[in-house]
Image: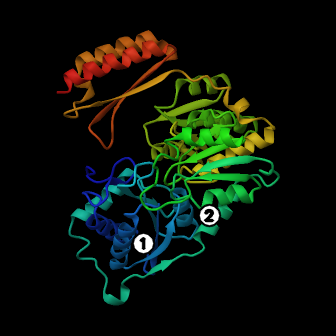
Amino acid sequence: MVRKLFGTDGVRGVANTHPMTVETALALGQAVAHLFRNHSGRHKVVIGKDTRLSGYMFETALSAGICAMGGDVLLVGPMPTPGIAFLTHSMRADAGVVISASHNPYPDNGIKFFGRDGYKLPDDVESRIEGLMYGEQLKESRPSSPEIGRAHRIDDATGRYIVYLKSTFPAHLSLEGLRIVVDCANGAAYRIAPQVFAELGAEVITIGVQPNGLNINDQCGSLYPEVVSAKVKEARADLGISLDGDADRVIIVDQKGDVLDGDRIMAICAEEFAHRKRLARNTVVATVMSNIGLELYLKERRIRLVRTQVGDRYVVEAMREGGYNFGGEQSGHLIFTDYATTGDGVLAALQLLAVMVDSGKRLSELGDRLAVFPQVLHNVRMKQRVPLESMKRFQKAKEEFERKLGSRGRIVVRYSGTEPLLRIMVEGHNRAEVEAMVMSLAEKARAEGQ
């Protein structure tokens, strides 16, 4: 079945506009409750959200749909996406639901799901959910009145998740003596993240911890690392941590104010894990968007890089299939499967801090080891989704540029999963040359995509 609602990370759109409506949320709740009802007793679904105003109505609609199909709902309120994954598994729930549009502005919202094992649902299960929503089966499966579900609020959910996060930091290490700036993007981690770092001994300076329903990701968080960078320099802090709205990704800033994206963090952690024989199969999993500099850096250290399509869920799937325990995205989704089932910004920061504290080095010393190649990304808005193989002039130019770049450059072309955009990425040694290639390819794509 072709999916109509689900994109690369759940259902997403402008709140109160199709598909992100109360009616869709109600139907999703019914479908998920029916699909995961795998035993005769009570079954339960965890629901968490970020701090968007529209989260209230989607939380209520999802709860109604789940209860209507005989499921019990466990409401945890504002909670990072990885926190929902953790709670779903640890509380032995049948599924977990996250109401969030991640790094998007507040008018947007989204709904994504975790299975009882804490992992995001695969494409085929999302297709089954859509099949139930558009079919007749749900109408015929409604339980009788005594079997209607109940909704409960879990008051200690935040505390449980904080204890779990702290447990991933080595017990023999401490953050005492470190001054850390933490930007929570006025999002789901606004209470949790500062408390975790403070309880491990750090002096914490906070940004973006006053959500009002409208200011999530507003000139703060991982899309605006310059904010935490300025604060680090002003406060003479040791580093800055910048999370996105649902705290599943992180961007780090060193004591100089220089930004470390997901590629730099992967390079630091992978080298340390390999040195300590903790890197499963001596392999890191990343997407096609990770810089070729990371690939060459790892290769020099005899660490293999496996690439996937864009999306942290695909990184996780490749990790599970290959038996790997570390991977991530340039955007800051970092997955440590020894501890978690999905990207976790706070957990990733703790792992990086452990390397830093244990080595006794400043973050700038660790981050400078990776030589990043110039990388230029250009989005071309297309009138229609023309198959790439049918764009002959575009393909010919792309092949010529790839021969010119050789083994020390790459071209990645893909369509956006949510918008009518063709994304063209070129990387190589010479920025001017890379930019010229991108613009040439963009021009040819526009000409053939009318």
Note whether 166 is above or below 373 in the view shown.
below
**What residue is disc 2 on?**
161
Snapshot quadrant of residue 19: bottom left
Q: Are marks 1 and 2 in contact (CB under 8 Å)?
A: no
Residue projecting furthest to the front: 234
Which dot, 1 or 2, sits closer to the camera? Answer: 2
Question: Could you tell me which secondary element the residue under label 2 belongs to?
Answer: helix
Local crowd size for mark 1, using a 10 Å CA cut-off: few (<14), some (14–19), many (≥20): few
The numbered mark at residue 38 is 1
Q: How far across and how far down the image is residue 228, in percent? A: 59, 43
Q: Residue at x 63, y 38 (%)?
A: 253
Is residue 328 something that shows in the picture?
no
Mark-to-mark CA distance, 1 and 2: 27 Å
Q: How far across and how far down the image is residue 294, in percent? A: 58, 27
Describe residue 141's horizontal placement relative to residue 361 as left or right: left
Note whether 245 is above or below 411 in the view shown.
below
- For badge 2, the amino acid type reads Tyr
Question: Could you tell me which secondary element the residue under label 1 belongs to?
Answer: loop
Badge 1 or badge 2: first in the primary sequence: 1
Q: Residue at x 56, y 71 (%)?
A: 91
Local crowd size for mark 2, using a 10 Å CA cut-off: few (<14), some (14–19), many (≥20): many
Q: Nearer the viewer, residue 438 or 230?
A: 230
Q: Residue at x 29, y 14 (%)?
A: 396
Q: Nearer the viewer, residue 351 or 387?
A: 351
Describe residue 350's horizontal placement relative to residue 289 as left or right: right
Q: How far across and how far down the image is residue 189, in percent? A: 56, 58
- For badge 1, the amino acid type reads Asn
Describe residue 353's horizontal placement relative to residue 337 as left or right: right
Is residue 204 something that shows in the picture?
yes
Q: Quadrant of the C terminus?
A: top left
Colour setting: rainbow
Q: How far across and how far down the image is residue 306, in percent? A: 53, 33
